[in-house]
Image (cartoon, grey):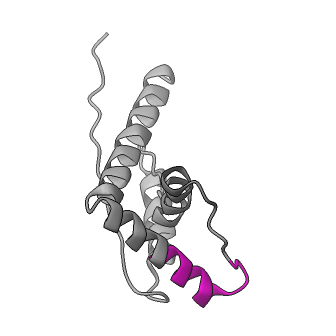
Amino acid sequence: MSEKEIYNLVLGLAGPYGAGCRSLAEEIGRIINDWPGCVSKVVHVADLIKYFYKINFYEELIIEENDEAKRREVLQDAGTKLRDDDPELVGKIISATIYREGNLIEQFKAIDK
């Protein structure tokens, strides 16, 4: 039995609020998931910022989920504070999360053979 080769493709989408990144990510995910043997995984940087802010500063972010403008402002300020603490931290967190998620997908696909 030959081992299946696995390739990873990472797409990063970023844009101002209302630019359509979320819709585009959903559409790309649907297309990728339709390809045989392919799986898509969306990583939301906002979720990572919330999680690691709490770990780094020992306090929970207070986010108004009903006020989108305030929600974005709080998350942007939190991301800035994380970067002020370590300019590379957010990039490291994103990279580590993508690596971990990729490994989980590869393990799942290997089990699924």
**Residue 36 appears at what percent x and percent y?**
42, 43
65 lies above or below 101 = below
Q: Answer with the quarter of the image where residue 99 lies.
A: top left
42 lies above or below 5 = below
Q: Answer with the quarter of the image where residue 84 lies.
A: bottom left
Magenta residues span: 64-76
Magenta portion: prevailing SS class: helix
* Residue at 49% over, 54% down: 52
* Residue at 66% over, 74% down: 63
Say which quadrant the N terminus sits in.
top left
Is residue 57 in view?
yes
**Residue 3 appears at what percent x and percent y?**
29, 18
* Residue at 31% over, 51% down: 92
Q: Answer with the quarter of the image where residue 83 lies.
A: bottom left
Task: Name the residue nearer the viewer: 66 or 86.
Answer: 86
Q: Is residue 24 magenta?
A: no
Task: Name the residue nearer the viewer: 101 or 68.
Answer: 68
Side of 10 where 37 appears, left or right: right
Side of 39 where 74 appears, left or right: right
* Residue at 44% over, 26% down: 107
**Residue 113 appears at what percent x and percent y?**
46, 21
